[in-house]
Image (cartoon, grey):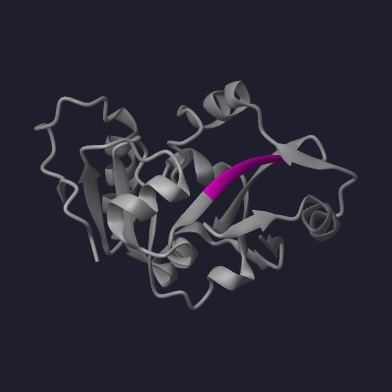
Amino acid sequence: MLSSTMVYSVLWGVFSVNVKGVYRVKNLIRKYGVKAEILEFSGTIKSVSAALKASGFPPSKILKTLVVIAGGRPCIVILPGDGKLDFRELSRELNVEDARLAKPDEVEELLGVKPGKVSPFLDEILNYNIIVDESVIGGGEVLVCGGSAHHLVKVHVDEIVRVLKLGIKDVSKVG
């Protein structure tokens, strides 16, 4: 259930916040015919805990999209909000020596958005190897970042899988 925080489907061109990223998300959703709803929040949504407070969705239904540098190459990892990336397992799955989170300037250079605004529905995501943690599969309706600090996308996991053509791996650990 969504809380009393101001949330509504986006009517494009009406808002005063910087929504460049959300327009890019909207364009990808339209381009691929994704069945999704873009929600706007009056408060800033830059973390799973903020998304939880604003939306009422449990952390397992709020997906985070991480930019990782693995073996010197960028890749995208999608995890449930209550999961933590297991870098050792990711390195093993990708057959690389090391993996780390991308630095903020690397995220911005690779995707054109700052950390906290990374959405799986940015066109640039499709340029990289995309891995979703297997715990996400079969998760039904979830929330993902909408490309800005004020937007989330409500979408079925099957739509994410269809559009992103991702690899499914066990790369998270509990807690």
* Residue 121 x/y as whole percent: 41, 48
Q: In the rendered image, which quarter contains the N terminus? A: bottom left
- For image coordinates 42% across by 42% down, the residue present is 122
- For image coordinates 22% across by 26% down, the residue present is 17
- For image coordinates 48% across by 28% down, the residue present is 114
Q: In the rendered image, which quarter contains the C terminus? A: bottom right
Main SS class of the magenta portion in the image: strand
Tell me how many marks there are: 0
Tell me the magenta residue range: 65-70
Q: In the picture provided, is 73 more to the left or to the right than 160?
A: right
- For image coordinates 39% across by 66% down, the residue present is 159
Query: Vertically, is 83 above or below 15?
Result: below
Q: In the picture provided, is 2 more to the left or to the right than 53?
A: left
Query: Vertically, is 55 above or below 70?
Result: below
Q: Nearer the viewer, residue 50 or 125?
A: 50
* Residue 169 x/y as whole percent: 69, 66
Is-magenta flag for residue 145?
A: no
* Residue 166 x/y as whole percent: 58, 61
Q: Nearer the viewer, residue 165 or 56?
A: 56
Q: Is residue 116 something that shows in the picture?
A: yes
Q: In the picture provided, is 74 more to the left or to the right than 58?
A: right
Q: Is residue 120 something that shows in the picture?
A: no
* Residue 117 x/y as whole percent: 43, 36
